[in-house]
Image (spheres, rainbow, N blue to C red):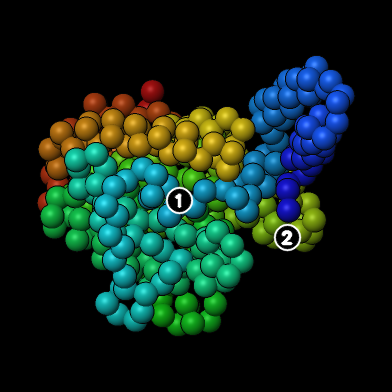
């Protein structure tokens, strides 16, 4: 089903298809009418996707045809080998991960996987991981650290699964362990929000040296429906909630929660290969930069980045490198975070 902003476009494209069919089946000269309608469709697409409201961005981030982690893995990387299981309970298919090549560079890639159709979405729990999913992700990150491979994470989830079984197996602890371990992982980490980034379920893959976000993705502490239900006791006010939550890429770039917005024009579901190639170039550029850093400097800069988040723009150069062997509590007094 198309989202509301696409309904008018669908009608125009249906009319265009009818005109083309009529031109082929009759002797009528409809070339001028077809050309005019094609121009009108192109203009309409640009106008629509340049002026999306926050709620429309939420809808676009949830689009049924939006590329998934596995779509990007097949387009961006070579020789992907998926690894399974957390070595404690079972394999969680809401998280996929494994080894791959980015050009000639070995990397570990991890991401949420919602699924491409209803059957796959049911099997993958609509991209909502259980604790074993996050423990699988952490196992792969620690393996990457052992062998000196950078980590690339794809974020696309409504949030971690909050069922009874997940809570019994330590959902909160699994997410907290990921946050703690990623903050001290001695290899470069790049994360990208490709669709919906919801709550701690998204943040568990989001503690990175560089955080990217597709232009029409969203990233928030709760869904707009949940926000409206809690604040106003009315989930039908979700569109209004989206407008005040600061969940768009543009809002989060201004707040310095993310580092870069990745252009997707009319939407990644319409420009899958183009967006994938753009991500590939950005990943390569960032890893060339980050892999050249000393691990202690990398950890120091990551610490400063997250220590000062939400307080203002941090002059990282004014903070002396923190010894990687020191924990955050010991290091904090020695690092005066300067706001500029």
Residue 134 can be seen, yes or no? yes
| Residue 317 picture location, percent across and down | 24, 26
Give the residue pinned by disc 2: 229
Nearest to the observer: residue 23 or residue 72: 23
Give the residue pinned by disc 1: 71
Residue 298 can be seen, yes or no? no
- Tag 2: Cα neighbours inside 10 Å, few (<14), some, or many (≥20)? some
Image side of residue 175 versus residue 101, left or right: right
| Residue 167 picture location, percent across and down | 48, 78
Picture quadrant of residue 313: top left
Image side of residue 188 versus residue 27, left or right: left
| Residue 171 picture location, percent across and down | 43, 72
| Residue 276 picture location, percent across and down | 43, 39
Residue 327 drawn above or below residue 171: above
Nearest to the observer: residue 50 or residue 251: 50
- Dot 1 falls on a residue whose secondary structure is helix
Q: Earlier in the sequence, mark 1 or mark 2?
A: 1
Q: CA distance from mark 1 to mark 2?
A: 33 Å
Q: Residue at x 70, y 41 (%)?
A: 56
Residue 125 drawn above or below residue 261: below
- Tag 1: Cα neighbours inside 10 Å, few (<14), some, or many (≥20)? some
Q: Residue at x 81, y 29 (%)?
A: 23
Image side of residue 117 versus residue 129, left or right: right
């Amino acid at each position: 089903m198309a989202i509301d902003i696409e309904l008018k476009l669908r009608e125009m494209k249906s009319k265009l298809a009818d005109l083309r069919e009529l031109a082929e089946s009759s002797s009528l000269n409809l070339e001028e009418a077809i050309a005019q309608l094609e121009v009108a469709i192109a203009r309409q697409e640009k106008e629509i996707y340049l002026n999306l409201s926050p709620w429309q961005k939420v809808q676009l981030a949830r689009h049924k045809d939006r590329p998934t982690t596995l779509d990007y893995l097949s387009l961006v990387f070579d020789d992907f080998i998926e690894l399974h299981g957390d070595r404690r309970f079972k394999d969680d298919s809401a998280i996929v991960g494994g080894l791959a090549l980015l050009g000639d560079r070995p990397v570990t890639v991890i991401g949420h996987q919602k699924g491409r159709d209803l059957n796959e979405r049911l099997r993958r729990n609509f991209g909502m991981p259980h604790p074993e999913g996050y423990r699988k992700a952490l196992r792969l990150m620690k393996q990457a650290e052992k062998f000196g491979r950078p980590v690339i994470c794809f974020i696309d989830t409504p949030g971690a699964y909050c069922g009874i079984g997940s809570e019994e197996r330590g959902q909160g602890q699994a997410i907290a362990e990921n946050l703690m371990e990623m903050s001290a992982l001695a290899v470069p980490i790049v994360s990208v929000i490709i669709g919906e980034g919801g709550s701690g379920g998204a943040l568990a893959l989001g503690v990175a040296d560089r955080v990217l976000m597709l232009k029409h993705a969203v990233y928030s502490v709760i869904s707009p429906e949940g926000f409206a239900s809690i604040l106003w006791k009315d989930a039908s006010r979700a569109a209004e909630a989206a407008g005040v939550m600061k969940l768009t890429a543009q809002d989060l770039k201004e707040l310095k929660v993310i580092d870069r917005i990745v252009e997707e024009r009319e939407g990644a579901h319409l420009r899958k290969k183009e967006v994938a190639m753009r991500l590939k170039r950005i990943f390569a550029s960032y890893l060339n930069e980050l892999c050249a850093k000393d691990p202690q400097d990398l950890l120091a800069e990551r610490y400063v980045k997250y220590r000062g988040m939400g307080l203002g723009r941090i002059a990282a150069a004014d903070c002396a490198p923190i010894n990687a062997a020191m924990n955050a509590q010991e290091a904090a007094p020695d690092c005066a975070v300067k706001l500029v």
